[in-house]
Image (cartoon, rainbow, N blue to C red):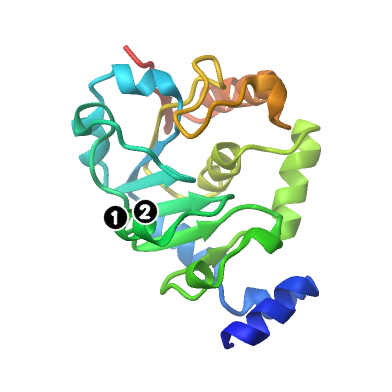
Amino acid sequence: MNRLSFLIDRTLRNENALSTLSAPQARLLGDWAGKRVALVGNARGLAQSAHGAAIDAADTVIRINRAPIPSPLSHGTRTDMLALATSVDAASLKALDPQRVLWMSHKRKRLAWNVARRAGFYLHPQVDYAALRDRLQAPPTTGAIMIDLLARSDAARVDLYGFDFFASLSLSGRRTADQVPHDFSTEATWVDALLAQDSRFILHSHG
């Protein structure tokens, strides 16, 4: 697929054509099998922590959206995968240098050609997004979509950093909870239930 055909398929919402650019979901899940995964959210409170070394010690480090790293002490330095639901400029993408970029948003019109053409690119299926949206009764955050996907993997352990469900707002922007379309209370309850049911998942505080 060239850039022109990509733009046409994106405009026409040709999901079958766009999916040909994606690595199979089974391959992505296989990347995590038996691994310790660190999923790093963008809560501002994480900047007050000293989790950086633990994050970098994981087998796979996944960051979200623009993935600000204010300090290696709090956030670590590695980015093996970048889960996106927004645009990222070329310089930031080059600096993060992920091995895989995962497009988690159902909004295909935001997907850029320079992202879709990267080696190892993954396009999250619309049906999976819709199932989680219906379960939460609200559009899920990128973090929630990633947690849902990781829960379906055979990862040995999943450490969640930088998740406080907007209590400390986000390092990625200035919006408040009432300015975004997500239900953070419901997501927090859903994650709490997952933590109780699946001992592989560990939610780290910012302290």
Front residue of 135/7: it is 7
- The percent position of residue 102, horizontal first and vertical second, equals 51, 58
Q: Position of residue 81 (x, y in %)?
A: 39, 54
Residue found 73% across the figure and 78% down from its top = 9
Q: Position of residue 168 (x, y in %)?
A: 49, 16
- State whether residue 189 is above or below residue 19: above
* Circles 2 and 1 in contact, beta carbons < 8 Å: yes
Q: Marks 2/1: CA distance?
A: 5 Å
Where is residue 192 shown, x and y percent of the image?
57, 20
Q: Secondary structure at mark 2?
A: helix
Write the residue at 78% across / 70% down: 13
Mark 2 residue type: Ser
Classed neighbour count for the residue bearing mark 2: other residues with Cα under 10 Å, few (<14), some (14–19), many (≥20): few
What residue is disc 2 on?
92
In-front residue for pair 56/114: 114
Quadrant the C terminus occupies: top left
Q: Nearer the viewer, residue 188 or 162?
A: 162
Q: Is residue 29 left or right of residue 187?
A: left
Query: Seen in the image, is 7 located left or right of residue 116?
Result: right
Residue 125 visible? The answer is no
State the mark number for residue 95.
1
